[in-house]
Image (spheres, helix red, strand yellow):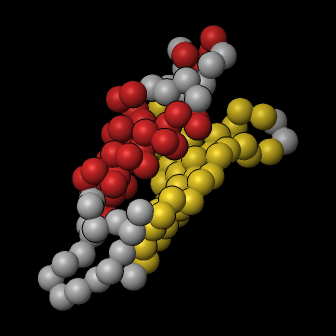
Amino acid sequence: MRILIENLTFETIIGILENERITPQTVVVDCIIGYTYTENHFINYAQVAHLIETTMQKKQFFLIEEALEYVTLSLKNQFQAIQELSLTIRKPNILANCSVGVQKQFFF
């Protein structure tokens, strides 16, 4: 079974530039979670989305790479049934002509 969370969009402090440490900016997160579904055993996607958003807002990461690694560990600790995780974190407004981000796939 796969859970898809696409375009989870919120404002947070993230980045190394001086203005990024002061002014919240938009981030967009995509997440794919693979796990074994059985009756009455599922992962609540609303809880996953909430954990991603609140973790990033609370931690105010300097690098999106650090955010990606930390959020991954947080998800695995909270939802131990996760067997596979693909996480993408993008900053769509940091450059004028493109969206930039990082992506990694994890197997547990």
Residue 20, compared with residue 69, is above or below; it is above
Q: Residue at x 60, y 25 (%)?
A: 15
- Residue 88 horizontal/vertical position (percent): 58, 53
Q: 59 left or right of 15?
A: left
- Residue 75 horizontal/vertical position (percent): 34, 52
Q: 24 left or right of 19?
A: left
Which residue in the rendered view is the most extreme toward the right? 97
Q: 83 left or right of 30?
A: left
- Residue 24 horizontal/vertical position (percent): 52, 26
Q: Quadrant of the C terminus?
A: bottom left
Residue 10, compared with residue 104, is above or below; it is above
Is residue 57 at least partly visible in the picture? yes
Quadrant hosting residue 21: top right
Q: Quadrant of the N terminus?
A: bottom left
Residue 29, compared with residue 10, is above or below; it is below
Which residue in the rendered view is the most extreme toward the bottom? 39
Which residue in the rendered view is the most extreme toward the top? 18
Q: Residue at x 25, y 53 (%)?
A: 78
Is residue 3 at least partly visible in the picture? no
Q: Residue at x 48, y 64 (%)?
A: 107
- Residue 81 horizontal/vertical position (percent): 28, 68
Which residue in the rendered view is the most extreme toward the front? 108
Which is nearer the eye, 12 or 87? 87
Circle count: 0
Q: Residue at x 67, y 44 (%)?
A: 101
